[in-house]
Structure formats: C-alpha cells, structure tokens
Amino acid sequence: MVSRLPSRILHVDGDTFFASCEVALDASLSGRPVWVGGGRRGDGIVIAANREAKRFGIHTGMACFEAKRVCPNGVLAKPQYDEYRRLSKEMFQIMEAYTPTLVPMSIDEGFLDLTSMDRHVWRDTTVPTAADYVNDLRDRIQTELRLPVSAGLGRSTWMAKLATSAAKPGFVEVPPDCEQEFLAERSVSELAGVGKRRERSLAALGALTFGDVARLPSTVMQQRFGIWGQQLWLFANGRWNEPLLLEVKDRTTISSNTTLPYDEPDYAAALVFALSESTRMIGQLRREGLQTRELSLTVRFTDFTESGAMYRFDHPQFRNSVINTVLEGLFDELMAGHAQPVRQIRLGFNNLKPLDTQPTLWGTTDAERWGALDAAMQQLEGQWGSDTVLTGAQYALRHQNVTHSNPKPKCPFVPAREMAQKLWGEKLEQLSQHHGGISKR
C-alpha cells in the first residue's frame, strides 16, 4: 500500500502591501519611509507603513500627524484602492502558474499546494528544491510588479503561516520532521484563530507555548476545546497534516460602512445618502442572485456616539421599494431625539437567501422582471459607464453636493470566494468538477 505523502503547503504574503504598492507605483519613493493614511482625506490614521517607516516607530493605527512628527522626511500617501486591487490580481495570476491549487485569503496573501511537486514537477528540472521554486516565484513578483513578498512552507496552513511570520522578509521551510522543534518555544498566541479567550483558557492549563501544549494529555485538550483542541495538540506535536482545499462558500451578508465627506447636519440629506447606498447594495444583491431577510442600520454621530436598529422581513426581499421603505422608517426612528451631525452610516443585508431570477424581458413574476431589469442596467453601464442609470435617490445625491460626485473608494479586502471568482470566473465551476481538492458549498 502506498503511504500518503505529507502535505506541502506554501503561504505567500505581501510585505507591507499597501505601502509597497505605493513604492511600486512611484519609483522615486524607493528606499524612503512611506505610510498610507486613511480617513476622509487620507490623513487620518496610518493603515500601512513600509519597513523604512517602521524603523521610526510608525505603526498601523498611529495618527498621521504623529507619524509626520517622528519622521519628518517620510512620505504620506493617500490610498489608491483601485491600483491595489489591480496589483493584487496580477500577483495572484503569477502565483496561479506555480500550483494546481491556489486559495486566496485576502488582497495580499494566499496558500499554494506544493504537495507532490518534487515527484511530478521538480524531478529532472533545473529547479530541484522547494527553496529554489519558491524563491523563483518571489523573484518574479518582485521583478514584474516591484512588490516584495515573504513565504513559508509547511505541512499545514497553520504551519505555513507561522513559517512566513518567522521568515519576514524572506522564505522559511519547516520540514515535517522538524515541526515540533520549530514550534516548541513559540507562543500559542501567534497562531491564527487563538483569540484572547482561548489564550486565557490555555494559560489556565499552563500552556503558554506550543511546547507546553505538546506536553499536555491529548484528552485534556479534547475535553476542554473539542475538535479544535485535538487538532492543536496534534499540531504542537508535529503530527498535524492537512490537504489544501478551496472552499467557495455562499455569501451570507452584504454590508457598507461609509464615513461621509463631512459631518452632515441635515438629516434629510443623510437619508438621501443612505437610500442611494441601499439602492447600490440591492442591485448587488440581485446581480449575485440573492435576497435579504434582515436589514441593519447604524448611524455614528460627530461625537462618535452611535444609534442602531435591525429589521427582519417576514419573507426574503430583493425589491428597492420594499427595502428602502423599511430603511426610511428605521432611519426616522434612529434619528428621533438626536441633534448631532451624522459622521458615518453603516448598512447591512444579513441572512441572505438564494434568488432565482431569469433575465427574460416579459417575465410572469416579479423576480423575472427584476432580473431582466438588472441585466439591462448592467449592459447599459458596461457600455456607457456606471452613472448611466440612476435612481431618484442617487440622482439627488449627485446634485446635492459636488463632494459626492466621486464616492469614497471602498477598502479592498475581499473574501476568498470573491477573489477566486474574479481570478477564474466560469473556470471555477470546471475546477470544482475536475479537482478533488476543491469543494463548493
């Protein structure tokens, strides 16, 4: 009987990705301290800083004015999310050429399956080792996109991610027979998925490091933490082996969190913005063949106090008239008794359900007619631009204030399902059918 090969999973992670993108887009920034600022005008808090900036103590969450104080010669860059998305897509396209299975995790990191590469790919080639193969991948991303990436190779996604953290900047491989030694002195808090509650529970058992976990009886870990505890015990003992699977899960929520260009004292104007954003999200719902069972609204005021409410529909909804009518009612309830200007509006469609729409022009049901309308709108927008067709709320918002003419770009963190769909499109269904390592839920 042929024994199962140990999994070899590679984790690739962009180094200070947003700041590195700015350097890649502007060669004059090379070698200089650079940080990317968030907020309304791109000068709020630091959302990314390159290694040169970090040497001055600049870190994520620091106020940009404080960063400028500690590093007067540094460069503050305003976010260019569209460019970050473009560079991310190109980076993943390069990574796809190096593996049969690629699982994107965020805009700048993903896992690659390298199991059996030494048997089927590296044999009798000029790239005989994993290190050569991975460094060739890293060099190609650096050469073609001018983006630095680090990588870690291990027998599981947990191990690969820890190896990457140890490697930054660079590459580290942890052979299967060296995993327990590699983990022995490392804190359990370094592992993704170990939150504060689990960390405290492990500390109560005297387990501060993976070596401590390995010395505990496996039954204790299983009784205290269930399946996860048993997996952690196996991992700490260097015995956790897992295949890499691409799980494309159905979306369960669509949300929007937008800080207005200025604190809005006119609640009617703030409602127009909320309705316009809701209309955009409803269109996204229908394009993805979904409808919502729950609507949530949260308003943050200029003093950072918040008021929020949620509404549950009797039946899942996808129509503008129904959802926006409820939204107006929620908004009026939330604003009653308040006088502070509105700073931020958060909308959420939750508990999403499938919607079966057919893009027929003369449908016999509401779902069919809405499907035809959305298909026609997409075709018009694709040919003439995103502002070709506007609802009344969207038109009013455009003419309410010029600052709304260029909506604030959304932060580009994208779930693995969406990133996979953007990378492969219809090919994703073919992969689901022909690769045993890919599953769709």
Image (spheres, helix red, strand yellow):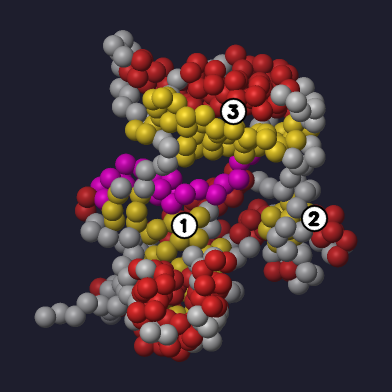
The amino acid type of the residue labelled 2 equals Ala
For the residue pair 206 and 349, the one nearer the viewer reads as 206
Task: Check the image and report above or below for 363 versus 234.
Answer: above
Looking at the image, is mark 1 or mark 3 earlier in the sequence?
A: 1
84 relative to 426 in the view: left or right: right
Residue position for label 3? 277
Q: CA distance from mark 3 to mark 2?
A: 29 Å
- Categorize mark 1 by other alpha carbons within 10 Å: few (<14), some (14-19), many (20+): some
The reply to whether dot 3 and dot 2 touch (C-beta < 8 Å) is: no
The reply to whether dot 1 and dot 3 touch (C-beta < 8 Å) is: no
Residue at 42% of width from left, 81% of height from top?
236
Residue 24: percent from left, percent from top: 64, 57
The amino acid type of the residue labelled 3 equals Glu
The reply to whether dot 2 and dot 1 touch (C-beta < 8 Å) is: no
234 relative to 298 in the view: left or right: left
The amino acid type of the residue labelled 1 equals Met
Q: Secondary structure at mark 1?
A: strand
- Mark toward the viewer: 1 or 3: 3
- Categorize mark 2 by other alpha carbons within 10 Å: few (<14), some (14-19), many (20+): some
Q: Which residues are magenta?
A: 408-432
Q: Quadrant of residue 359?
A: top left
Looking at the image, is mark 3 or mark 2 earlier in the sequence?
A: 2
Residue 379: percent from left, percent from top: 43, 22
Q: CA distance from mark 1 to mark 3?
A: 27 Å
Main SS of the magenta part reads helix
Residue 357: percent from left, percent from top: 33, 24
Does residue 417 show up magenta in the picture?
yes
Residue position for label 1? 105
Residue position for label 2? 63
Quadrant showing the N terminus: bottom left
The answer to whether any part of residue 82 appears in the image is yes
